Image: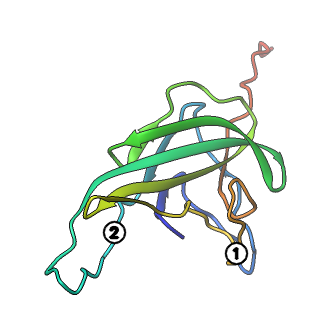
Amino acid sequence: MGLYPDNPPVAKKWLSLQTDFIQVDTLKPTFRWHPLAIRVEPPKDQDSARIDNITYELRIWRTVSSDEGKLVYRRRQLTTTEHRLEHALEYGTRYYWSVRAHFDIDGKTRTTEWTLAGYLLRSDSVPNDSCLRFKTPDRPNTMPKF
């Protein structure tokens, strides 16, 4: 699965191949995920491998179809496992999201796979049916009550 998401949470129905679109309560939600946890076997001629320069990349796509989306938000070089959106998304809209880590092992840059929550047969590209999902609140009713 990659980096495990905390918020928005993943909700999956029993025996379902896809996750549900989780309702968030704002147009500028905060995304959270677990930090990169990696264990690396050092080369035979070394006692340990050095892992550093860990950063995260977050992407959000507005859904276009069941497995396609239009990229609407991307942030790179995030140094924490939390990010609040800097601009508002659209009301009543479904989105895909994913995060991945970039890091160095002994000076060589590596990247994890995108975090996905769906079935095992997944595409190499994102977005796809296995992406994490959320939806924004509907537009508030601005009509006066009588």
Using the image, determine if residue 61 lies above or below residue 87: below
List x then y, in percent, for residue 134.
65, 49
User: Label 2 amino acid?
Assistant: Ala
Q: Quick one: 46 or 136, which is closer to the camera?
A: 46
- Residue sitting farthest toward the bottom: 44
User: Label 1 amino acid?
Assistant: Tyr
List x then y, in percent, for residue 135.
69, 44
Using the image, determine if residue 36 lies above or below residue 62: below
Quadrant position of residue 101: bottom left
| Circle number at residue 37 | 2
- Residue sitting farthest toward the right: 65
Residue at left offset 39%, top offset 45%: 82
Residue at left offset 68%, top offset 36%: 137
List x then y, in percent, for residue 12.
67, 69
Q: Is residue 110 left or right of residue 107?
A: right
List x then y, in percent, for residue 43.
25, 81
- Answer few, some or many: residues within 10 Å of disc 2's Cα (few below 14, many 20 plus, some between 14 and 19): few
Q: Which residue is mark 1?
A: 119
Residue at left offset 54%, top offset 70%: 1
Quadrant position of residue 70: top right
Give the alpha-carbon distance from disc 1 to disc 2, as whole Å: 22 Å
| Circle number at residue 96 | none
Using the image, determine if residue 120 lies above or below residue 85: below
Quadrant position of residue 115: bottom right
- Answer few, some or many: residues within 10 Å of disc 1's Cα (few below 14, many 20 plus, some between 14 and 19): some
Secondary structure of the residue carrying numbered label 2: loop
Secondary structure of the residue carrying numbered label 1: loop
Q: Is residue 52 left or right of residue 94?
A: left
Is the C-beta separation of discs 1 and 2 under 8 Å? no
Q: Quick one: 21 or 76, which is closer to the camera?
A: 76
